Image: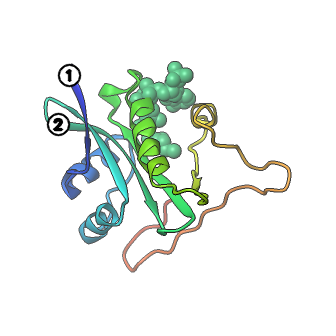
């Protein structure tokens, strides 16, 4: 195995394949393309060219950003790839913080990964003064309600 890490270059088809590999749904093709285009940083792990992992962050261009789609294909898990992906997307965002600026990166952790994300500095909620993180979805016609991925 020869894992290399790349900034960008993930196609919508590769993105969908990664999502499907971990049991998440693929989104509408136009939405997948928009999701990738709207990301500030996408780091892709490739094994001999094949996309086997990703992490991405998008921001409002100001003080708030979100990390999403931390995915490693099951046949490549437990080899430190996710840790490397998250380290790299965070390094990129940190480099954008100018003197006097502050950036919050929100993370809706999957169940059981709080320790992993906590090791990077994310604080779990609820905590004193902060409630639970919350999420909701809107569904276009023809999409069945689901809350995974
Ligand atoms: C979660 C996921 C990205 C981890 O990828 P990975 O490459 O296997 O992770 P790593 O090998 O870099 O391990 C990172 C750390 O998390 C821990 N970890 C990995 N998977 C875990 C799991 N399912 N539950 C709890 N801890 C886990 C590892 O023990 C490791 O800890 P360490 O660095 O202290 O040794 C991968 O299992 C995955 O794609 N899961 C499905 C999608 C998902 O839920 N993504 C997270 C969305 S918030």
Residue designated by label 1: 2
Q: Label 2 vs label 1: CA separation?
A: 10 Å
Percent across and percent down for residue 64 are 56, 63
Residue designated by label 2: 50
Q: Is residue 122 above or below residue 130?
A: above
Percent across and percent down for residue 66 are 51, 57
Q: Nearer the viewer, residue 101 or 106?
A: 101
Q: Is mark 2 within 8 Å of ligand 1?
A: no
The reply, left or right, for residue 49 in relation to residue 59 is left
Residue 111, quarter of picture = top right
Percent across and percent down for residue 35 are 34, 64
The reply, left or right, for residue 37 in relation to residue 80 is left
Residue 149 seen in the figure: no
The residue under the point 50% across, 75% down is: 138
The residue under the point 63% across, 31% down is: 115
Q: Nearer the viewer, residue 39 or 27?
A: 39
User: Which of labels 2 and 1 is toward the front?
Assistant: 1
The reply, left or right, for residue 148 in relation to residue 130 is left
């Amino acid at each position: 195995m020869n894992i290399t890490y790349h900034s960008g270059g993930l196609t919508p088809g590769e993105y969908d394949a990664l999502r499907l590999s971990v049991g998440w749904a693929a989104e509408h093709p136009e939405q997948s393309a928009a999701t990738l285009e709207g990301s500030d940083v996408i780091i892709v792990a490739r094994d001999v060219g094949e996309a086997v992992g990703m992490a991405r962050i998008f921001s409002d261009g100001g003080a708030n950003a979100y990390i999403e789609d931390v995915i490693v294909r099951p046949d490549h898990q437990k080899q430190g790839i996710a840790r490397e992906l998250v380290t790299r997307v965070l390094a990129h965002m940190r480099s954008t913080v100018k003197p006097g600026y502050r950036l919050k990166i929100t993370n809706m952790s999957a169940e059981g990964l709080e320790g992993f994300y906590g090791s990077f500095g994310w604080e779990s909620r609820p905590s004193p003064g902060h409630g639970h993180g919350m999420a909701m979805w809107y569904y276009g016609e023809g999409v069945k309600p689901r809350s995974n991925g």
